[in-house]
Image (cartoon, rainbow, N blue to C red):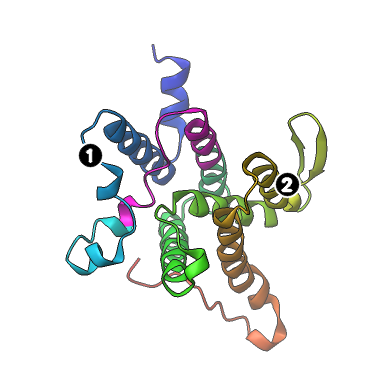
Amino acid sequence: MPTPIESWYTDIPPITRIYVTSACLTSLAVQLGFVHPLHLWLNYDSIANGQWWRLITNFLYFGPLSIDFLFHMFFLARYSRMMEEGFYRSKPADYVWLLTFAASTLILSSLILPFAYMPFLGSPLAFTMVYIWARRNPYVRLNFLGLVVFSAPHLPWVLLCFSLVLGGDIPTGDILGIAVGHIYYFFEDVWPQDPASGGKRLLDTPRIM
């Protein structure tokens, strides 16, 4: 008979399960000394020299095993799962395209905007998922730490303020995730509804997907 943890894990939809599992295994490998974070981070010189895996591994490392790591895994699993089970149910290609677009935009932003560079972009990617889910659920009410009740679209800003209070620095990753999430949300959900768009979706999933 499966344990509650096994049942929870097997119930996670496949794309989210692959991402969360890969992130956990990556941090575990670093923790056990099998790989060093310097072999995973987004280093453009190394990528130019053929280390293409960095384009993927920089999204998989969320830091050493800690409370902060568990916090990131919780938000990644929760909101990616709700996205995959809700808006992208039976549409895995569309969800893979969303992740591909968001990841590519984050890498491009870190390349052309010096202030936006981060060696690991997993957290901004997870924040992108949070932003898109929040904007698509305007009537959902949320409770933060039992202290504040607000509607879902305010969730990214509440989390951003929480990161600012805890860290004391401007949460660049959160802001970058919000920006990329808004770009996708605008062109996928808002622009096609504008008469000037002619109903055309500029971020429609490519046929190759």
Residue 171 drawn at (x, y percent): 60, 52
Residue 191 drawn at (x, y percent): 65, 77
184 vs 8: above or below: below
At 52% from the left and 46% from the top, the residue drawn is 80
Q: Nearer the viewer, residue 118 or 205?
A: 118
Q: Nearer the viewer, residue 156 or 64?
A: 64
Residue projecting furthest to the left: 50
Toward which corner of the image does residue 165 lie, by quadrant? top right
Kindly identify which residue carries mark 1.
35
Amino acid type, label 2 = Val
Q: Nearer the viewer, residue 50 or 209?
A: 50
Please provide the residue range marked out in magenta: 56-76
Q: Is residue 37 magenta?
A: no
At 47% from the left and 61% from the top, the residue drawn is 98
Helix, strand or loop at mark 2: helix
At 51% from the left and 54% from the top, the residue drawn is 124
